[in-house]
Amino acid sequence: MSLHPLFIELLQVALLIALAPAFAGWVKIVKCRLQGRTSPGILQPYRDIRRLFIKDVVLAQNASWIFRFTPYLIFGVTVLAGGIIPLISTDLPLADTADIIALVMLFVIIRFFTALAGMDIGTAFGGMGSSREMMVSALAEPAMLMAVFTVSLASSSTSLTRMVVVMSQGEFVIRPSLAFALMAFILVALAETGRIPVDNPDTHLELTMIHEAMILEYSGQHLALMEWAGMMKLTLFFALGIAAFVPWGIAAGGQPLALLMGAVLLILKLLLGGVIMVLIETGLAKMRIFRVPEYLGSAFLLATLGMIAFFILE
Amino acid sequence: MTALDITGFSILLLLGGAIACPLLARRERLLIPVAFTLAALASGGVILSGFLTLSQGLNSAATIPLGLPGLPFNVRLDPLAGFFLVVIGLVSLFVSIYSIGYVRGYLGQRPVTPLVAFYLLFLAGMLLVIVADDAYLFLVAWELMAAASYFLVMFEDERAENRRAAFLYLLVAHVGALAILLAFGVMAGVATGYERFDGYTFDAMRGAHLSPGWSTAAFFLAFFGFAAKAGVIPLHVWLPEAHPAAPSNVSALMSGAMLKTSIYGMIRVGFDLLGEFPWWWGGIVLIFGLLSAVLGVLYALMQHDLKRLLAYHSVENIGIILIGLGLSMIFTSFHFPALAALALVAALYHTLNHALFKGLLFMGAGAVIQATGERNMEEMGGLIHPLPWTSALFLVGCVSISGLPPFNGFVSEWLTFQAFLLSPALPQPLLRLLFPLGAALLALTGALAATCFVKAFGVTFLGAQRGHRKVEHVREVGPAMRLGMTLAAVSCLALGVLPTYAVGLLDRIPRQLMGGHIGAVAGRFGWLWLTPASAERASYSGPLVFCVISAVVAVTYLLLHVRGASIRRAPLWDCGFEKITPRMQYTATAFAMPIRRVLGFLFDIREQVELISPVNHPVMADHIRYRLRIRDRIWGWLYAPQAKAAFWIARQVGRLQQGRIQIYLLYSFVTLIVLLAFLG
Amino acid sequence: MTLTLLLWISVLVAAALAFIGDWRYAPEVNIAGSALTFAVSLALALQVYQTGAFLAAGDFFFVDPFNVYLVVLTTFVSTTTAVFSRRYMRVERDHGRIGPIRMRFYHAMFQLFIFAMLMALLTNNLGVLWISMELATLATVLLVSLYRTPTAIEAAWKYFILCGVGIAQALFGTVLLYFAAERVLGEGGNALLWTNLNQVSGQLEPTVLRLAFVFLMVGYGTKVGLVPMHNWLPDAHSEGPTPISAVLSGLLLNVALYALVRCKALVDGSTGTHMAGNMMIGFGLLSLLVASFSMLRQKDIKRLFAYSSIEHMGIATFAFGLGGPIATFGGMLHMLVHSLTKSAVFFSVGHASQMHGTQEMARIRGLIRGNPAVGWGLLLGVMALAGMPPFGLFASEFLILTATMKQMPLLTPLLLIGLAVAFAGLFRRVQPMAAGHIPPWQKPLAAANLPVALHMVLVLLLGIYLPGFLATWFQVAVGLLK
Amino acid sequence: MSHSLVVQLNLLLAALILLSSFALLMQRRMFAILHIFAWQGFFLGVSTAIIGYASGVHHLYLSALLTLAMKVLLLPYILYKLILKLKIRREIENMVNVPATMMIGIALVIFSYHLTEPIRQLSVLMTRATLAVALATVMLGMLMMVTRSHAVSQIIGFLAMENGLFFAATSATYGMPMVVELGVALDLLIVAFIFGIFFFHINTTFDSLDVDQMAKLKETD
């Protein structure tokens, strides 16, 4: 017997919403371990979110509707993205809603409105955050697209499900192009999700923060939504990487067993991925804002190399 | 009454109106609504006829017994023309409605009759360009359009910089027109060898078979001319001058509609009149497209005059359209009709979209300027509170032009990407390698555009008032202006949410031009999925994106407000910083600083910081003076030298005539002797 | 019959005005005379339209489509100019710039000048053509120096001497032509008749004709204002009274070009080569370029438009030199619309300079606000001159440029440069004059708007609709000149 | 009078005309210039008459008379009067270096000989040889106008050109048709009238007839 696609869809989205904080917590734990601190435990993010939901919203006086609308929009967009990327199965009704390029643009919506919200409350921090965020994204965009493009060459398609199918069903081949693309993707993903070395998620040190600077004035439910959406976004980037580069295990149809299998594998991959990211983060130091272009430039270079490799070697 | 009749009738209506305008010069309060309603009606007719032509794939021609002997005015409507009629019609419809309110703002300041008259004339000119079917009528219409818009740009003629802008604009336009003229000359010459006049009809040119050399000459002459009008870098210099100078409704029309006529010209000449061409033509078009796109958006990012910024974005978007065109030409020359069709549809769709959102943005800018009397963004801020409508509609424009789903800008850019990603099909390995880089540049452009409009919207409408002017006296603009903008915004959203229908219509044009077409709509619920090439290749569903997002937003909102969450207003926290003032906000210049730092080498930047201290010691400085001047390098590289050269030659020529009559006699004497010696 | 009447009218009116030229109603008489000639010329045109080309007064006069349209043009422009000069000269008299005697002289000479040009156009005898050209020059020389200012006298002197010398060279050319003709047609008067010459042009001695054409080219070219024999033109145009500038560049240049074209037809017919044509192409192109670049540095408004006349004459010469049906057609059209436009522009210019009491462009400002008719007239006129559609000059330039593209594509860049620079030169000067605020020194003025309006409407019409009879005439004329 | 004699006479007169135009080119003093010009006119008239007699083209007599009347009597007289009136009797004008002008003049003569060579081949008239002289006279007249900066001498140069033209007409074609001849004469009259007026104006405005000071209208700065 096989589950109805719509049900799978809901299941996946629910899974994402539920697990995202846990994943964030896992990342924190690993990081603490590596830095020799005691961790607050994997459930800490849940507690934070609950606390924020209970609290009232304190709005800055000149905050406009944009500032209030943004959290909901961001949450909505993230959920949609969660419905598109195949996490546990490729048999998703929403999967065809957007191919990988459209998906990238969905993430741009998030950034666009976060930046607007940052400027809405007219502080120096907000403006600074928005300005830097937009620059980083502007430079990250081409690299991202190149990586995506290289991957899509293999399956001659930009639809994610198609990519997954082609890679996991087809016989396994070593693709140097994908290796390059993966490296590029990781670099870009770090930048896009605001991790070290581009941004530091857990600092309020004025001069280094980008993302935090934009959401500085948020509080209560709004902040909760923002944080939650942020965690989901982090998870989704991993999911994207998994779907694009190591899709093995993602179920093709709706058999419960396969789905379960897929879910388990997904969680394992996420845990592993988290560790890798933490290793990178702790290994590197936060770089000056004007070093970022070189960093993203190298990402672009890698992606281009990947593509050239595809045309030359494969 | 056929589509062609409707169009002709609308054009006559506009011309008649233009001629009749002076009659109402005494009663301008009456003239404005009458004239612009007329314009709106005419636009409506044009949209109708264009739509009919496009949807039914009509191809009807007629001749008007005017013009040169043996060369009456030929007009024709085919799907291509129909589409551009729709584009121009839509923009002019919205802008005309908007103008009813906008132009009233000038009453009491200066006579608006010329503005109205030339506005109507301008519209008529653009429409004539589209329906013209022979070189002569085409050029007459083309220059009519240029002349009318020249007077419109010069409307506020007491400002010297406006006059300069208008002059520059007309000069570039005229030189371009001459180039186009020569292009037609080449084609007509081959058609009938200059013994008769009827070689100038487009039919004759279609029939003519040019040698490669001649056709190359023809195409690039035409391309130069049209590019000059479209503002393709490096021929763009007039554009950022002229658009700000013109009244905003006119800039909306110029940027939204007029630039498109040159795209039309390129397609008409390239695909229709010439037909077959080598791939490198497309390559060159593509390169210019990429150049304009990237540089355009970068220059835009450096502006702090709202309308200048928008003007540079027109350069960028024209670039994106050219990218589509170039791709389509390349695919055509390698005989991939389906891929060529995809690229062409992408270009055309972006043409339509740019017309709408750029029209919307310029209308919004006009509203802001009229409300605040200010063009410099550094003086604005916090306008979202007094201008709720305008700001919301402007935001729609920003989102659309930044290419964010589910709005229309995204769809066309996405189609262009798809066209890029289909390059592996090409036989040319080099092209296969280079195309993705082009795609990357396009991505960069998109991201920078988003950046630029975060800046534009954020600095203009968000935060707190920066300048010295008070926000209090700013009032929301009138209903007519709001209606015009709203209609534009709605159509932006509609074209983004339901692209399949539009694309299905556009698909007829490649069918007409190159016989190829894309399987735009596939499978069950076809209208839901936009699938260029094939369903598993790539797909996008505007409706779903829109519905899901809005659904989730609604649900979360409701969930969170079942128990009425109390919202408390409080002063800014700002990390506990106490005395925060509006002057501490990021300005437009500050916002663009990172990009300026990273990509500064592309500009001609003069930046100087001055520490002013009573006891001249930098540490004791009590305030800082900061000067920044950013120039378009291209002016210095291309235009200034030309002007210098011209005046140098003029000086040398002047020496011929130094006043003494004996010398003059000597000239004629020497001329005689020389001629006798060599020819006698 | 009508033809002789035509000539007599202008002579008699000239004679009459010589006596009553300072009478209050002298301007009206002047207008009436010109209008009468215009009416008669229309009758003549009708005759040609019905019966085609014909000889008159024995074979002394020859009327064909080529010259009849120039005749109508001449009489028409002279009429409108007379209308304009009524207002203009009144203002001049009120400013005390000219007295009664000179007024008489002015009116008489105006009509004499018209007569001379009509004679030159209508005569069949190349010798008489030469004489009337000289007469036309002499009639205008003293009009140029009418104001007696040092610069006016200087300009008139240069005009007198340079054109005198030029015309003398033309006479030598005519003598050689006669010499060549005599050997074919035998001794006597009819050896100089263009009709006869044209019939036997094949048998005329090429070597002699080549020699002759050089002289004719330099001679009549001086009067057309071709570079480098053009130096008299800007001076004469800028210093004379504006009505005279209008007719000089509107009509006289045309007549000179007409003479040149007639001779060219003969010479190329005889030599069988394209030597005359090439020579005209060279001179035309040189004039176009030099004139357009000179425009960039002008300060005096009338000088500016004088150079633009040189430029346009250059284009027309170029077109005739190019030959071929479309180019020649374009050349004729160009002569027609240019003289209409240019005279209209000079009317506006005249009023503009009267309003500001100077011809210095830097001091002429805010015309549209000050006097909309004059301002718009100037601006639209300049647009037409710059070759913007829908005005007629665009039609001719369209034909000429496209024809060039086919026949001599390598020359098109030069043409392009010339036209573009001329465009810039005109606009960067005229735009600030038309636009902007009214300067304090500007004086209100009752302008004569009818002529300008009439001309501009005609130019506009010719741009979008070329009447059939005119077209057929041009076609026939093209046939004649082949 | 035998045919050859006529030809020789004609040639002699041609030589004299050429000589006179060279003299005009060299001569500094006003009155002298005037006289030479009158002489040139005289030679021209005589030669015209002779040709008329020899060729039996009788309207040439008339044109000879015209020439004598105008170029020998009328124009010199007018100029004479003007010079007296305007008190420029003593005028000695400075000229660009004379030997050079000389050389150029000779070069021009040779050039015009070379030019008229083909015509001489074609022509059957007994006067064909003199065409070169006629052309040379025209050119020397122009040269004179170029080199002189005095209004009067410029005018005389101009008139000398006219002489050359006239001579060309007679020697190439036994004179133009009568109507043309008359017309030319008429024009010449008007010319005389006009330069008369001009001398007055120039003299009153610039209080000298030196045209060098009439160089205000120019493009150089």
Image (spheres, rainbow, N blue to C red):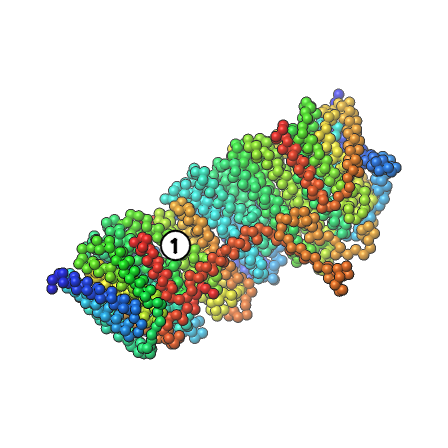
Q: Quadrant of residue B557?
A: top right
For the question of whether residue A15 can be seen, the reply is: no
The structure residue drawn at horizontal position 52% and vertical position 32%, both measured from the top left corner, is B335
The front one of B553 and A254 is A254
The structure residue drawn at horizontal position 37% and vertical position 72%, both measured from the top left corner, is D210
For residue B340, side relative to residue A253 (left or right): left
In this rendering, is residue C164 above or below B307? below
For residue D61, side relative to residue B430 (left or right): left
The front one of B594 and D42 is D42
Estimate the x, y position of residue B498 in percent, counting from the top left: 64, 37
How many residues crowd mark 1 within 10 Å: few (<14), some (14–19), many (20+)?
many
In this rendering, is residue B406 above or below D86? above
Estimate the x, y position of residue B514 in percent, counting from the top left: 51, 34
The structure residue drawn at horizontal position 84% and vertical position 38%, both measured from the top left corner, is A35
The structure residue drawn at horizontal position 75% and vertical position 47%, both measured from the top left corner, is A129
For the question of whether residue B617 can be seen, the reply is: yes
- Secondary structure of the residue carrying tag 1 is helix
Amino acid marked by disc 1:
Gly
- What residue sits right under mark 1 in the picture? C284
For residue B654, side relative to residue B617 (left or right): left
